[in-house]
Image (spheres, rainbow, N blue to C red):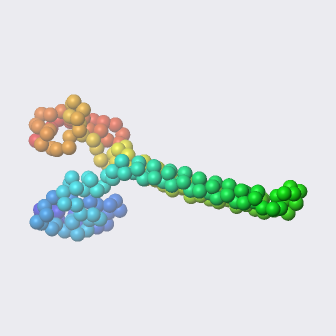
Amino acid sequence: MLPFSDESLVRLASHCQTPIVSAIGHEKDSPLLDLVADYRASTPTDAAKRVVPDIAQEISDIEKIRDRMYRRLLSTIDFELNQISQLRNRPVMKDPNVMVTTRREEVKALRDRSLRSFSSILEIEKKELKGVKAHLRSLSPQSTMDRGYAVVQLEDGSIVRDASKAKVGTRLRIRVAKGETRATVNE
């Protein structure tokens, strides 16, 4: 555990612009690297779970935003239809010429307000959806590899999640952000 308390390593980690996750996996020990890391995880597996969010949850969030936007739109339309219905039921509607001459500005103002309201709601929801899409894109496997991670597979295509599964002599396929390479386990 002493290498994780080395002064030069700790200084380097404290000045690093990239977020540092410490996941050494020894709960009893407290190396200095844990103190300067942006996040400390109990094990490397715990760190991976926290760094890469749940895609299903992200998709669920997008669906909720879409449903909320749809409900807002229906609510705005219902409100405006109710306004129009109220206007039609006024006594002044018995004489259409009076209605046209006295309410022209009111109808125009209502229409303009509903268009502004709809446009505003639509813009807000578009921005929110755009942000969620960008966030979801940043969580994609390709984006994770762009940050320096790799996918290691056995020859049969199965992903290596446990180093003990890759015995000495095992051929590996290593995919990185821009291509792939092959390796053989030596130790």
On the question of residue 138 being in view, the answer is no
- Quarter location, residue 88: bottom right
Report the residue at 56% width, 56% height from top.
72
Q: Is residue 69 left or right of residue 10?
A: right
Image quadrant containing the N terminus: bottom left
The x and y percentages for residue 27 are 13, 63
* 5 is higher (above) or lower (below) than 74: below
- Is the residue 76 above or below the residue 187 in the image? below
- Residue 97 seen from this side: yes
For the C terminus, give its image quadrant.
Answer: top left
Relative image position of residue 46 (x, y in whole percent)? 22, 56
The x, y position of residue 120, in whole percent, is: 62, 59
In the picture, measured across the screen, residue 45 lies left or right of residue 164, that is right
Q: Is residue 135 above or below residue 7?
A: above
Q: Is residue 62 left or right of residue 38?
A: right
Q: Nearer the viewer, residue 88 or 74?
A: 88
* Residue drawn at 18 percent across, 33 percent down: 171
In the image, residue 178 lies at what x, y percent? 36, 40
Q: Residue at x 75, y 59 (%)?
A: 89
Residue under the image location 20 percent in, 40 percent down:
160
